[in-house]
Amino acid sequence: MDYTRLGLQLRRAREYARMTQEEAATQLGITPAALSQYESGKRRINALMLERLSRLYGVPLTFFFREEIARPAWEEALRAKTDTLSIRGKAGIGRLIERVRDLEYLYRVTGTPFPGMSHPPFEPLHHQGFSEHEVFEWAEKARRHFDVGHAPLPDVRSFLERQGYHVFMVPLGQQREDLSGLFFIHPELGPIVAVNEDHHIARRPFTLAHELAHGLFHYDRPAILCRSSDQDPLERFADRFASHFLVPTEALHEWLRDRRIQKAERPEEVVHLARYFGVSYLMMLRRLREVQGLGVPEEQLRSVKPVALAKSLGYPVAPYEFGDQPLPLEERVPRIYLDLAYRGALEGQISVSRAAELLGVSDIELEERLEQLAEAQAAPATEALEIYA
């Protein structure tokens, strides 16, 4: 093997991922000097380290053994915006790119037609200085388009996937300046949304609705990377849209009237509202403030533990809401990703080991999942097992 040529490709991959040697070495748990030796061809590299570098940089292994590789426009658009990201954010973008490539592979290997991009329901918005009332009207138009009225959307992720969005959860960092999410259009898969897995799960509905705003009104841009600290008018529009879309003012007032509550004064009332609309406790506090629905100073309602309070009130609470467990696989990749991986393994289009690798689980765990799926398909509909719970 020509280690000098391989080292050159390793350096190109790192630069393509917008990482310094120090940043990449930190993620790999090696010294910058060791990585420098790999890149100069002075140190032999094993298959395991090549696999780790491939995942970190978000490039296929073949990248290291070919002079040039075609880079799709969607990937270039993402890479071009990563210079200011943290080390973890850059690695997360690489992970997302790898996941998207894997989804492309699953569509192809199973012979499933690519969904493509459906015709957007609204013209792209180029003007950015919208008033609060104008943003409210756009959120109302979106709800009418999707025919959801003023009903709550308790599972925003499933809602987006029904509209053709592919939703991924990837780690992007926990600092205030790190990304909360991102949006871009894939030429074959259609709209792609990624949410920061490092943020608390309660933030996810708002981030998803924020990215939906970009998907509905800003789809003419190659890629949009979103930070909660960003004061760009585009981001402020998406924030305001998300608030109105998730918690319509009329529905909020109706909930309060039905319970004879003039203004919320107790944390329990805020928790009930948050669970009803499927949003975080803090977001519900903000919406109540915006519609003048608080009967006490907001600070009095902030010193609670919303998840623990929700559990004490009888709401089902998943362990990962407390941060006690990592997100399950079903929460981290689109449902179609799971379906195609299972189908490919069951129909022999890919091996069980390959499907397990794509899903990030052990062969044994995947075999158990496939057994459950086979039993569910063979059982009557009333007895089918729900393996995605």
Image (cartoon, rainbow, N blue to C red):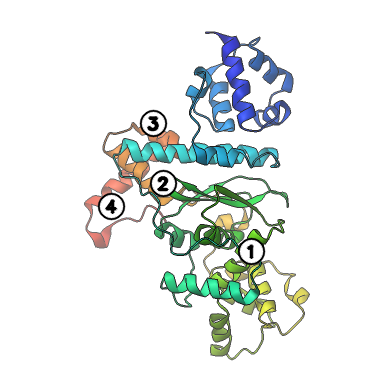
Towards the viewer: 172 or 295:
172
Depth check: give the residue in front, 311 or 30: 30
Structural distance between the alpha carbons of marks 3 and 4: 22 Å
Label 2 is placed on what type of residue?
A: Leu
Mark 4 / mark 2, whichever is N-terminal: 2
- The residue labelled by disc 2 is 189
Q: Which of the 4 image quadrants contains residue 246?
A: bottom right
Q: Classify mark 2: residues with Cα within 10 Å, few (<14), some (14-19) or many (20+).
A: some
Residue 323 vertical placement versus 275 (above, below) = above
Q: Which residue is mark 4?
A: 376
Q: Nearer the viewer, mark 1 or mark 4?
A: 1
Q: Earlier in the sequence, mark 1 or mark 3?
A: 1
Identity of the residue drawn at 61% across and 17% down: 8
Asked if the residues shown at circle 2 and circle 3 are in contact, with their CB atoms under 8 angstroms apart, the answer is: no
Residue 236 image-quadrant placement: bottom right
Mark pair 1, 4: CA separation: 50 Å
* Residue under the image location 60 percent in, 38 percent down: 79
Number of the front mark, 4 or 2: 2
**Which SS class for mark 3?**
helix
Observer able to see residue 7: yes
